[in-house]
Amino acid sequence: MNPGSIALFISGAEIAFILFIVLMVFGADKVPEIARGLGKGMRQIKDATNDIKTEITKSAEKQGIDVDITKDVRSQIDKVKEDVDDITGPIKRQF
């Protein structure tokens, strides 16, 4: 899950309240250590995710599977746009 998507569901007041509770429970001297530990943990998760993506891509390439899906999607979008233009061409107003 993207950390940015979590921020969409938490307001500034809720974040301040959570930080206040953390400060009260752990104390001011432990907060930087906790933050560092969380940062390291998030970095390890991100690195592991990237490693998994790389391994999947390498395995797919060895099997001859096309991993660049964006080419296929773009060609399909272009085809749909052309079809829509063909259908709506005579109907469109001239501005």
Image (spheres, rainbow, N blue to C red):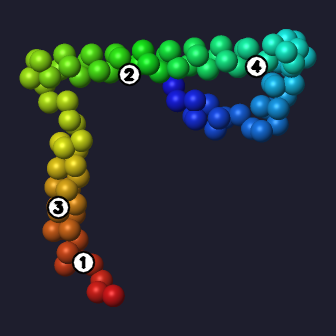
Kind of residue sitting beneath label 4: Pro
Kind of residue sitting beneath label 2: Asn
Distance, label 3 to label 2, CA atoms, is 38 Å
Identify residue for label 4.
32
Residue that sits furthest to the left in the current view: 64
Q: Are marks 4 and 2 in contact (CB under 8 Å)?
A: no
Identify residue for label 1.
91
Q: Circle 1 sits in a helix, a strand or a loop, which is it?
A: loop
Q: Earlier in the sequence, mark 4 or mark 1?
A: 4
Q: Residue 63 in the image: x percent, y percent?
A: 10, 17
Distance, label 4 to label 1, CA atoms, is 64 Å
Q: Residue 95 in the image: x percent, y percent?
A: 33, 88
Above or below for 13 versus 78 = above
Kind of residue sitting beneath label 1: Ile
Q: Which residue is rendered at x = 29% and y = 86% of the image?
A: 94
Q: Are marks 3 and 4 in contact (CB under 8 Å)?
A: no
Q: Which residue is rendered at x = 14% and y = 30% of the image?
A: 66
Identify residue for label 2.
50
Q: Earlier in the sequence, mark 3 or mark 1?
A: 3
Q: Are marks 3 and 2 in contact (CB under 8 Å)?
A: no
Q: Circle 4 sits in a helix, a strand or a loop, which is it?
A: helix
Kind of residue sitting beneath label 3: Asp
Q: Circle 3 sits in a helix, a strand or a loop, which is it?
A: helix
- Of badges 3 and 2, the one in the foreground is 2
Identify residue for label 3.
83
Distance, label 3 to label 4, CA atoms, is 58 Å
Q: Quadrant of residue 35?
A: top right
- Of badges 4 and 2, the one in the foreground is 4
Determine crowd level at label 2: few under 14, some 14-19, many 20+ residues with C-alpha closer than 10 A.
few
Q: Are marks 2 and 1 in contact (CB under 8 Å)?
A: no
Between 91 and 67, the one lying in front of the other is 67
Between 54 and 89, the one lying in front of the other is 54
